[in-house]
Amino acid sequence: MSLGPLLILILLIAVVSLITPAFLKPVNLGNILAQTAVIAVVAMGQQLVILTRGIDLSVGSNLALATVIGGLVYQQVDSSIVVITAMLVAGTAVGAVNGVVFVYGRLPHPFIITLASLSICRGLALALAPGHTTMRGMPDAVTAIGGGTTLGVPNSFFVVGMFGLLFLILTKSMVCGRWIYAVGGSPSAARSMGIPVRGILLSTYIISGFCAGLGAVLLAGRTAAASPIYGNLLELDTIAAVIIGGASFLGGRGHLGHALIGAVLIGVIRNALNLLGVDVFFQMIAIGLVIVIAVEADVLRNHLEARARVLQSASAR
């Protein structure tokens, strides 16, 4: 595992702490962990999709729709289990639709269906929300998971850690995890090896949808509300986190730990800009520039690796 993303994060924290001493206060660090949890959880699913050369643009709208469905269920049933299940099922269902349409609809790229889902889910969220606005209130267990703390550490941080461990086991220790990398590396080669390419692709979009639903639980819990405008531009944050972490749009490469570090990087950047009083519009510009730099770094890395392979091949002759 390369230490590059971690070293960048450490350097960024060091620089920010020198510029604004308030950054290292325990309360502020807790805020960063809580704010980053949603990005980190959804980025896990996005990571799997990108590993297979895909992309999921619907995660932000999916999250918003899941919170609205959770809010509507809470108005009828005051049960934490039912509300959490409703949000997870809603998110997973959207992911399943994305996967089925992409894989079995033979679309040339998942960009098409996930872009359509982005619009459809946002529209459904606005249509279903009473008054097209925020619904206040969530069950106690939901607010405890998303907004509570244990020994001063946000509970959402433990949720990220638990699911991060599960995803790490999936990608590094299980056969299906290795299949995901194989499909991303070369779909045709994976198919010739007997790997169920369609099933693997479908599963990644289902998992991505589930992660959006889990992100909905965390965000609804932290705000004690459901809103059709939640998750705005979350797809860009998660893509940036994955690419900053070293994954490639060409598929087959990426480490879950790096994606989580990328999520924290985005959280640190946003928090630092807030502490420095930078206008929110310039914050959007800053995150956009980070995405451009990350993508260009990916292109440069692929170019250098290709050159290195050519040189090695030439020297071996």
Image (cartoon, rainbow, N blue to C red):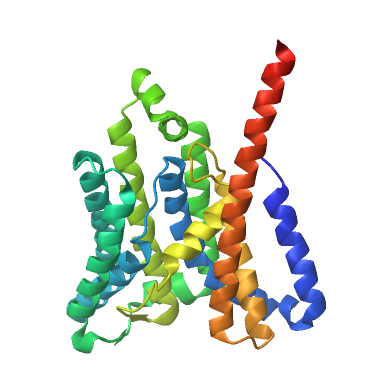
Residue 269 lies left or right of residue 100; in this view the side is: right
Count of marks placed on residues:
0
- Classify 241 as above or below 305: below
- Classify 180 as above or below 76: above
In which image quadrant can residue 190 be found? top left
Quarter of the figure that contains the N terminus: top right
Q: In the displayed orientation, state which residue is furthest to the top.
A: 317
**Measured from the top left, where is residue 248 in percent x and y?**
53, 44
- Classify 41 as above or below 185: below
**Measured from the top left, where is residue 161 in percent x and y?**
54, 55
Residue visible at 25% across and 40% down?
103
- The residue lying toward the viewer, choosing from 65 and 101, is 101
Residue 228 lies left or right of residue 163; in this view the side is: left
Q: Is residue 244 visible?
A: no
- The residue lying toward the viewer, choosing from 212 and 282, is 282
- Classify 307 as above or below 32: above
Residue visible at 33% across and 55% down?
209
**Measured from the top left, where is residue 21 in percent x and y?**
79, 81
Quarter of the figure that contains the C terminus: top right
Residue visible at 37% across and 52% down?
208
**Measured from the top left, where is residue 254 in percent x and y?**
55, 43
- The residue lying toward the viewer, choosing from 96 and 214, is 96
Residue visible at 60% across and 73% down?
286
Q: Is residue 21 visible?
A: yes
